[in-house]
Image: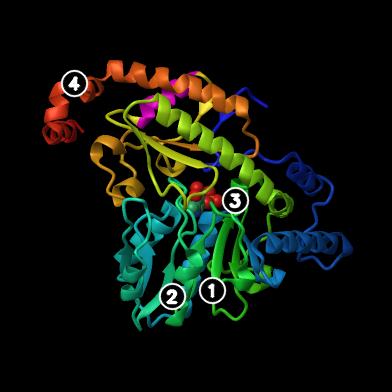
Amino acid sequence: MGSEIYFDNNATTRLLPEAFEAMRPYLTELYGNTSSIHRFGSQVARKVQEAREQVAALLGASDPVEIVFTSCGTEADNAAIRGILEASPGKRHVVTTQVEHPAVLGLFQHLEKKGYQVTWLRVDRDGMLDLAELEDSLTDNTALASIMVANNETGVIFPIDTVGDIVKARGIPFHVDAVQAAGKLPLNMKKSPVDLLTISGHKFHGPKGVGALYVRRGITFRPFIVGGHQERNRRGGTENVAGIMGMGKAAELALRLLGEEGRRVRELRDRLEQSLLDSCPDCRVNGHRKERLPNTLNMSFKFLEGEAILVLLDQYGICASTGSACTAGSVEPSHVLRAMGVPPEWIQGAVRFSLSRYNTEEEIRFVSEKMPSIIQRLRGLSALGKLSDSQEYQHNDSRTADRIEARR
Ligand code: PLP
């Protein structure tokens, strides 16, 4: 293991040693194909079935047959949305939110170009949905609603069962992206109105390159990847057996440790949050303070650039993010924070700390100690930062904000 202090777990997580051990034989001696007739292949097929049961247990699915393995969360999102649309070709209206991960957002933008009418539900300043807006958006022409469980940037949690009840009352198929929720929040498909649900192995200490789509029994669904008959004709292509075995093991451990580890991680996150609020002037938490993943803290530092903060944190070996890994490195301000109406002078200075069971109190102390001097140093360097302390700013808030906008 390196010497990094890793607070970027919403981007990806460290592979559990147990998951790695579960994968190892399938990368070496147990290389049979699950579709083969011979015993060598069918013993692998049986193991894949066990992993399916482990994933089904994490999701509270009533039957492992409802789990379809995919190559990642993005594929599962595509499979769900395209699979439903293809099964209902007459309907040309879809509903989603403005704050989805690019895996869903990008697909809906693509569908919009192809002639679908997309309702982009708004969020309030806490990042929460307006359920009345959702209800009003649904029509007889609505083919599908796809709404995430927990936001990857802010950790904000949508009341997904209530949302599902509204959608299902109109008989509309309901997909949720639970990539950030799996392993962090209890999920129970037996009692949920959700029809399709996406997860990804590498977000809960499983390997990269494997995901799963939960498809409720009885849902009409067409395969996105057409070809072989794998996954009961729901996803063509030889399975990533090692990946599936690793994800199965990670799912088993995630379920076992959910409550206990969740509480510990929440305590660490809350400690970090309080310490930064106390020691760094002009900072704020983005997103609902209560309805939020226990591991996620998204904070803005006024008039600063999040990327600059990350570079200085990196010098201490601290890994954090400005938000979604998929937009890191681009100068585009976060679409999630913009949708929440976060003002421009706060939006660029957003940093996301996302924790896992591997983080320690010592690491929290270390980051809490380093952050105030990093912020002070950047404010010293930044003319805008200086302005924020000055009398001029106090009296001309809106003019200053305009100047900052002009500089961007
Ligand atoms: N959905 C959400 C909410 C995510 O956070 C991510 C990854 O960050 C994805 C989907 C995509 O998952 P994958 O990286 O497995 O394609």
Q: From this viewpoint, is residue 82 visible?
A: no
**Residue closer to the observer: 279 or 245:** 279
Marks 3 and 4: which is nearer the front? 4
In this view, the residue farthest toward the right is 39
> Is 148 placed above or below 10 here?
below
* Disc ID at residue 193: 1
Earlier-in-chain disc, 3 versus 4: 3
Name which residue type carries label 2. Val
Q: Is residue 23 above or below residue 122?
A: above
Q: CA distance from mark 3 to mark 1?
A: 20 Å
The residue pinned by badge 3 equals 184
Q: CA distance from mark 4 to mark 2?
A: 51 Å
Q: Residues within 10 Å of mark 1 (few under 14, many from 20)?
A: many
The residue stretch that appears in magenta: 306-315
How many angstroms separate mark 2 from mark 3 (CA)? 24 Å
Crowding at mark 3 (Cα within 10 Å: few <14, some 14-19, many 20+): many
Label 2 crowd bin: few (<14), some (14–19), many (20+), radius 10 Å: many
Identify the residue under disc 2: 167
Amino acid on which the number 4 mark rests in the picture: Ser
Secondary structure beneath disc 3? loop
Badge 4 marks a residue whose secondary structure is loop
Residue wearing tag 4? 390
Q: Of the residues under marks 4 and 1, which one precedes in the sequence?
A: 1
- Among numbered discs 2 and 3, the one appearing first in the sequence: 2
User: In whole angstroms, how far apart are the C-alphas of marks 1 and 2?
Assistant: 9 Å
